[in-house]
Amino acid sequence: MQLSEGINAGQGLGIEIIATFQLVLCVLATTDRRRNDVSGSAPLAIGLSVALGHLLAIDYTGCGINPARSFGSALIANNFENHWIFWVGPIIGGASAALIYDFILAPRTSDLTDRMKVWTSGQVEEYDLEGDDMNSRMKPK
């Protein structure tokens, strides 16, 4: 994968961050078990999100979104120029989406101190991890 003519490394990085951000945010929002308002097909929503990312970014960066996909293309073509963009962009985009979803859009608790605990120890106390059935274990207490 490589950047298109006229796209510099900063622009390519921004495009990869945005494309990955919208995909990860869609995955988190459609698969969150705490939400009762999600109807329809989660796989369809995620597939449409992938399609949207590709339609918007493929002309500029080839739409890496997935570092493994970008690495395979670079390995076959033996072209690693600006390859860091296809690793750093998705990492920043995915991490940003996760943080924004967990801390702003759908926080598990309203106390900022409790929300910050996820960085050090997670929020295990909010889930019933003692249940025998996998479905009952993942439901919030």
Image (tube, rainbow, N blue to C red):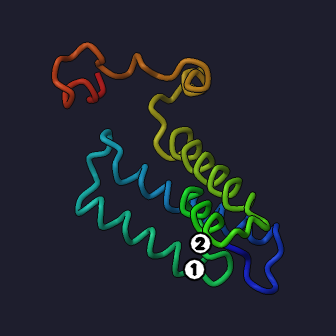
Residue on which the image places disc 1: 56
The quadrant of the rendering that contains the C terminus is top left
Work out how far the residue at label 2 is from the one at label 1, CA to CA, in angstroms. Answer: 8 Å
Q: Is residue 16 above or below residue 97?
A: below
Q: Secondary structure at mark 1?
A: helix
Q: Which residue sits furthest left? A: 133
Q: In the rendered structure, which amino acid carries the disc numbered 2?
A: Cys
Say which residue label 2 marks. Answer: 63
Mark 1 closeness class: few <14, some 14–19, many ≥20 residues within 10 Å: some
Q: Is residue 50 left or right of residue 99?
A: left
Tell me what residue is drawn at x 59 percent, y 72 percent: 63
Q: Residue at x 54, y 45 (%)?
A: 98
Q: Relative to the observer, which residue lies in front, 19 or 2?
A: 2
State which quarter of the image contains the N terminus.
bottom right
Q: Which numbered disc covers residue 44?
A: none
The residue shown at (51%, 22%) is: 122
Q: Where is residue 79, by image quadrant?
A: bottom right
Q: Nearer the viewer, residue 132 or 39?
A: 132
Quadrant of the rendered structure where residue 30 is?
Answer: bottom left
Point 56% across, 38% down: residue: 103
Q: Position of residue 36 (x, y in %)?
A: 26, 46
Relative to the observer, which residue lies in front, 13 or 126?
A: 13
Marks 2 and 1 in Cβ contact (< 8 Å): yes
Judge depth for marks 2 and 1 and give the one in front.
2
Q: Position of residue 47 (x, y in %)?
A: 37, 68
